[in-house]
Amino acid sequence: MPVAPPAGAFAADDAPLPPARVLGKSRWEPVRWSQLPGFGADAMYEAWNAWIRNCERPSAALATLCPEVRQLSIASPEEQRAWMVRRLQPYRVEPLQAGADPLLTGYYEPSLEASRVPTASQQVPLYRPPADLATRRPWYTRQEIDTLPQARAALQGREIAYLADPLDALALQIQGSGRLRIIEPDGRITMERVAFAGSNEQPYRSVGAWLLQQRALSDASWPGIKAWARANPQRVQEMLWSNPRYVFFREEPLSRLDAGFGPRGAQGVLLTPGRSIAVDKDSIPYGTPVWLSSPGPLLNLNRLVFAQDTGGAIVGALRADYFVGWGPEAGDIAGRLKQPLALWALWPR
């Protein structure tokens, strides 16, 4: 018996709606599929590749769908949509209490040139976690890491590689992972991914917000921050120290297969560009399929995505970070993306 229902099954979305659900900081209000903007126009084949990846680490509530998801990988978009209508109930995600406006931002995976040893132009280190990270909480601040002899001694020998630009190192720490093209001491080139391995557990402070408070600029996007840094090299260190949080990394091999996806998110699966989002896990569980709508000046989005990651700034029911991809173009989009947001959680009936 085929998994997908026959054509025309969209008309069957007329059963009584289930009650609303309350989950953590969010309220899920049941709606009809017809209320999801752009549902009939999304590129289902892109979404389905991400869904199959999502099924590598499904929650118990969603695991029963995965055999059908895999079977439908060769189905037509119409069959895939009809199956979603039959098997999933859309819920409009709303905050339990009024708060910040709904907001979609973006994040990406930096791709950077690095050296295994310091050179005349590459002297900004990326570190593995220090041996005493678990016993000293919080660990030293960013400024103390740069200035205190005891902090510098604790990190001696923990260097992974060296970058040329301290702002690239900061971007890598904010994003939580990145791709490095490393020149080895013998001249060989290796490709690696550095992934989040811990932090100093100091509070995160936005350097963009610091610059706005200083009235140093009016454009706090990442391109705006980099332009300010180029024009004010004597104040870059002060700007960096305004953010006490510091991130440590681990090395991961970057296979040809892994290179086609992003880093592993908090769910434990490789992120898919344009199909993975970071959410507040207390409002939307990891692995949840989500319909995302964000009509904006930079990106016009109506699409199926998956809640596969989280972030320190992603707090609240209507807050999401959209994984754009990797490299400079993705970084430019992620650095400028700030748009209104609406979310619908798609949950098994």
Image (tube, rainbow, N blue to C red):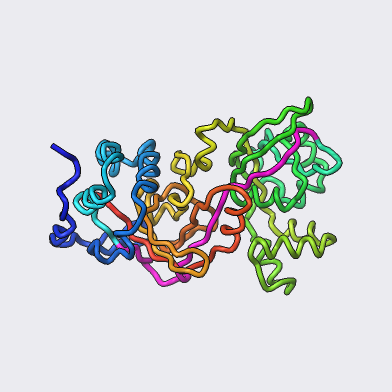
* Lateral position of residue 342 relative to residue 67, left or right: right
Q: Quadrant of the N terminus?
A: top left
Q: Main secondary structure of the magenta part?
A: strand
Magenta part of the chain: 92-117
Name the quadrant containing residue 123: top right
Rendered residue at 19%/44% (across/down): 4
* Lateral position of residue 195 relative to residue 127, left or right: left
Camera-nearest residue between 168 and 157: 168
The spot of residue 57 in percent (x, y) is 38, 37
Name the quadrant containing residue 182: top right
Camera-nearest residue between 34 and 233: 34
Camera-nearest residue between 195 and 328: 328
- Above/below status of 83 relative to 135: below
- Above/below status of 68 relative to 18: above
Residue 226: within the magenta?
Answer: no
The spot of residue 264 in percent (x, y) is 50, 40
Rendered residue at 29%/39% (across/down): 74
The spot of residue 121 in percent (x, y) is 83, 44
* Lateral position of residue 229 relative to residue 15, left or right: right
